Image (cartoon, rainbow, N blue to C red):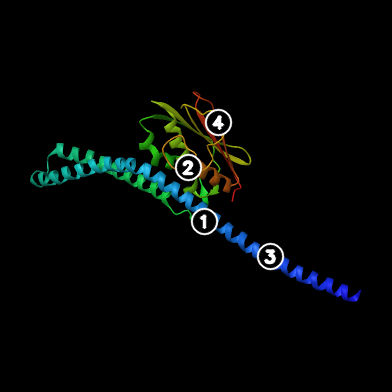
Amino acid sequence: MVKWLNGFWIFALILAIYTLLISRYYKRRIKEKARLVKEAEAQLIHMEKMASLGVLAAGIAHEINNPLSFLISNLEVLEDYTREIQKSLNEERILADLKAITQESLEGAHRIKKIVQDLRTFSRKSESQAVLIDINQVLESTLSIVWNEIKYKVDVVKDYQASTKILADPTKLSQVFLNVLINAAQAIQGKGTVTLSTWEDTKNLFVKISDTGCGMTKDILSKIFDPFFTTKKGTGLGLSVSYNIIKQYQGDIRVDSKPAEGTAFIIRLPKQGR
């Protein structure tokens, strides 16, 4: 009996050690898998951002090229006028023109500065830290980036009611808004309207981006947040990435859509998010 008990305790000890070793092994494996999943998610976000930048590159170049063109033209005129002023300081026509083209040049320079600033905000590395942001300003910056892509197709209506600032990464939220705005524009055949609305209650901020586009069937609606699902050209990652970004802030995205009646994306962000 004693020998049997000793054998039992030895077996139990070996089993306990084996279980502990197996548990540690699988914990390490789970930790490693979690790290790989996190890295893969970061890569997907980066891939989608790069894809979005690729779509916008031509439009941004166009937006910058316009003010640059008249800046160069104005500066060339200024150079000519400088020579004429040296000959005659009493030329009122030249002085009037100088004031006009100087103002136009400054306006163009400020336009370029804003485009570059908005693009830098969107292009920053995903490791950027959360800061207190004005959700309306993030929408405006995103609209500025995407404007050349959508301005010939849509009229934009704005109704900004939210005023509370929240702690968030403006780069990530800008990516969400950009994805939804591009989808809204692509859903519109011919000319349509995109409406940007913000409001808040005691606990949450809300952003609504609605369009007068073709709408979606229930079948498509059930898949739009699936990775790689797309009905258009592109990676099919935009809305999936957007969904995961909002989830990181304990928020959610709801979509209301019917064929031929347009689509509305309603984004909820807690005021006390992380």
Q: Secondary structure at mark 2?
A: helix
Instruction: Identify the residue under disc 2.
Output: 238
Q: Secondary structure at mark 1?
A: helix
Q: Percent position (x, y) of residue 225?
A: 54, 39
Does the residue at mark 1 contact the one at mark 2 (Cβ under 8 Å)? no
Amino acid at the residue labelled 3: Ile
Residue 240 is at least partly visible in this image: yes
Q: Give the label on residue 228, or none.
A: none
Amino acid at the residue labelled 2: Gly
Amino acid at the residue labelled 1: Glu
In the picture, residue 56 is in which quadrant? top left
Amino acid at the residue labelled 4: Asp
Residue 103 is at least partly visible in this image: no
Labels 1 and 3: the sequence-earlier one: 3
Mark 2 closeness class: few <14, some 14–19, many ≥20 residues within 10 Å: many
Labels 1 and 4: the sequence-earlier one: 1
Instruction: Identify the residue under disc 4.
Output: 219
Whole-Å distance between the Cαs marked 2 and 3?
Answer: 40 Å
* Rendered residue at 51%/56% (across/down): 39
Q: Is residue 130 left or right of residue 152?
A: right
Towards the viewer: 257 or 64 = 257
Instruction: Identify the residue under disc 1.
Output: 39
Labels 3 and 4: the sequence-earlier one: 3
Q: Percent position (x, y) of residue 11?
A: 80, 71
Whole-Å distance between the Cαs marked 3 and 4?
Answer: 44 Å
Quarter of the image where the N terminus is located: bottom right
Labels 2 and 3: the sequence-earlier one: 3
Towards the viewer: 163 or 169 = 169
Instruction: Identify the residue under disc 3.
Output: 22
Whole-Å distance between the Cαs marked 1 and 3?
Answer: 26 Å
Whole-Å distance between the Cαs marked 1 and 4?
Answer: 31 Å
